[in-house]
Amino acid sequence: MDYSLTTRLAAEFLGTALLVMLGNGAVANVDLRGTKGYGSDWMLIAVGYGCGVMIPAMIFGGISGNHINPAFTIGLAVSGLFPWAEVLPYIVVQFLGAMVGQLVVVASYKPYYDQTEDKLHVLGTFSTINSVGSKFNGFVNEFFGSFILFFGALGITKAPFFQDNLGTAHLALGFLVWTLVASFGGPTGPGLNPARDLGPRIMHALLPLKNKGDSQWSYSWVPVLAPIIASIVAIALYKALFI
């Protein structure tokens, strides 16, 4: 079935919002003082992000392609797999969805934000930060994590193995992200998605949180640029080899 651009944009908006709600919601549950999950381990966050991709993929994969990531949209367009005329509308709704999703997280966890004095923990529920303060390490981490994400996502959805059951392919995307957060999440989070990082970072700067601290704008370009470059390279490589 062919869906209108308006319908596909609605799917991208809702899918990106769900990604942020489930992913950053898991971070908030672990890092904000007083929550039921406070002090839980990293795997809870990995599950949150894995399902944050898998569930929108299962809902919207057959409607909009479930990009929910500007880097993926740009990478597909560069390789001729997505129309350039739709790139900007997709990116706009992805960012808006990420910002609205973050507002839901803040509304749900507001009393616990007020109790949390660690400013990095507060920022970490919005955006990524490099744990040793290295932009170079952050870029390397985001690039290779994103490369695996986009190469894997295209491989899973385009592979002959899944063509008779794309629902299973979209299920597999969740496990891919779950594994990436577990394997590459230590240095930065990771972001792997400009909208997922920059949209909530904008909200962090705008919202009057009690202990929010600095939004770390000097680092903000890393989780935007690295995934975009990685997407372009990964999708072009996959297309050259397998499509």
Image (cartoon, helix red, strand yellow):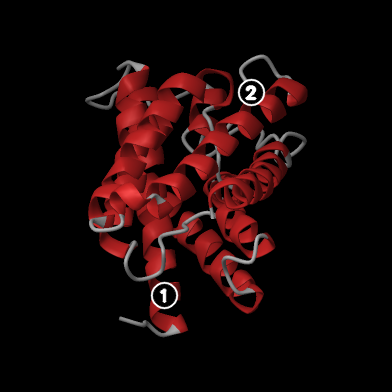
Query: Which mark is in front, 2 or 1?
Result: 1
Q: Where is 183 relative to 25, above or below?
A: above
- Could you tell me the amino acid type at mark 2? Asn
Q: Residue at x 33, y 55 (%)?
A: 57
Measure the alpha-carbon separation of dots 2 and 1. Answer: 34 Å
Location of residue 205 in the rendering, given as x and y in whole percent from the top left corner:
62, 46
- Could you tell me the amino acid type at mark 1? Arg
Residue 26 shows in this picture? yes
Q: In this view of the protein, which residue sits in the foreground, 210 or 172?
A: 172
Q: In this view of the protein, which residue sits in the foreground, 119 or 84?
A: 84
Q: Quadrant of the C terminus?
A: bottom right
Location of residue 162 in the rendering, given as x and y in whole percent from the top left corner:
30, 51
Q: Residue at x 34, y 61 (%)?
A: 61
Q: Residues within 10 Å of mark 1 (few under 14, many from 20)?
A: many
Give the quarter of the image for residue 75: bottom right
Q: Residues within 10 Å of mark 2 (few under 14, many from 20)?
A: some
Residue 110 shows in this picture? no
Identify the residue under disc 1: 8
Location of residue 70 in the rendering, given as x and y in whole percent from the top left corner:
58, 57
Identify the residue under disc 2: 130
Q: Residue at x 50, y 56 (%)?
A: 99
